Amino acid sequence: MSLVLLAFMFVYGAVRSALWARGQWRFHRMRGDLPRVEARRPAPAHLGDALEQLLGHGHAGRVRLVASARQVATVLIVDPDVAFGCVRDFRFRLALADAWSAASAWLQAYDALPEPEQRRLEAYGYTAREFGERRAELGRAVRRCVRAPALEPFAVPDVEAVQRLLLALIGDIEGCERALLASAPEHPYRAVG
């Protein structure tokens, strides 16, 4: 082996090690800023079984989406390739797949609501239209990820866009939960019009 190649391998290894250590230090400093899951609040007594189940699915989906968002944020912090403008960490692919299945499961639970319950939720101020559009956008990112070769790098701006998308999906589910938790029980003497 030539000395030039040996020197190049040494410099490459030193740079990768320094970037890895930098990422670990940044993660240690920034781990408190990663997304967190709020505790599940009890459902109001006036919600029917279907909306109460949707509230439970919402919390479960939000937990999984927050875990995926944390994983993507962690990859953006610790992956040594971020300094070169790309991400190769396999955890990004795993987080994306889990986020897709969590978003799909929540949307299926919403679509399984009976029509009167969906209208009731709309009266409380929530529709799943934006969530469906964002889920479709996430689906396109998942397809790009699945079709990519094993060690194919993903551009940092694309990974950051996925991170923002996951945070928006979390916000949509939180909006549904807020609408359900803030809903007022129907007055028994109110005239039905």
Image (tube, helix red, strand yellow):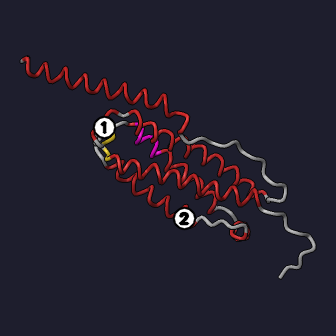
Using the image as rendered, state which of residue 110 and residue 185 is in the foreground. Answer: 185
Query: Residue placed farthest to the right in the image?
Result: 189
Left or right of 112 on screen, residue 21: left
Using the image as rendered, state which of residue 22 and residue 69 is in the foreground. Answer: 22
- Location of the N terminus by quadrant is top left
Q: Which residue is rendered at x = 13% and y = 19% of the image?
A: 6
Task: Classify mark 1: helix, strand or loop.
Answer: helix
- Res. 104 in view: no
Provide the major secondary structure of the magenta segment: helix
- Mark 1 is on which residue type? Ala
Vertical order, 49 against 1 (above or below)? below
The residue singled out by tag 2 in the image is 130
* Cα–Cα span, label 1 and label 2: 34 Å
Q: Which residues are magenta?
A: 91-97
The residue singled out by tag 1 in the image is 83
Dot 2: within a 10 Å radius of its alpha carbon, few (fewer than 14), some, or many (20 or more) residues?
A: few
Vertical order, 35 against 191 (above or below)? above
The picture quadrant where one finds residue 75 is top left
Where residue 143 appears, as percent x and y from the top left, is 37, 53
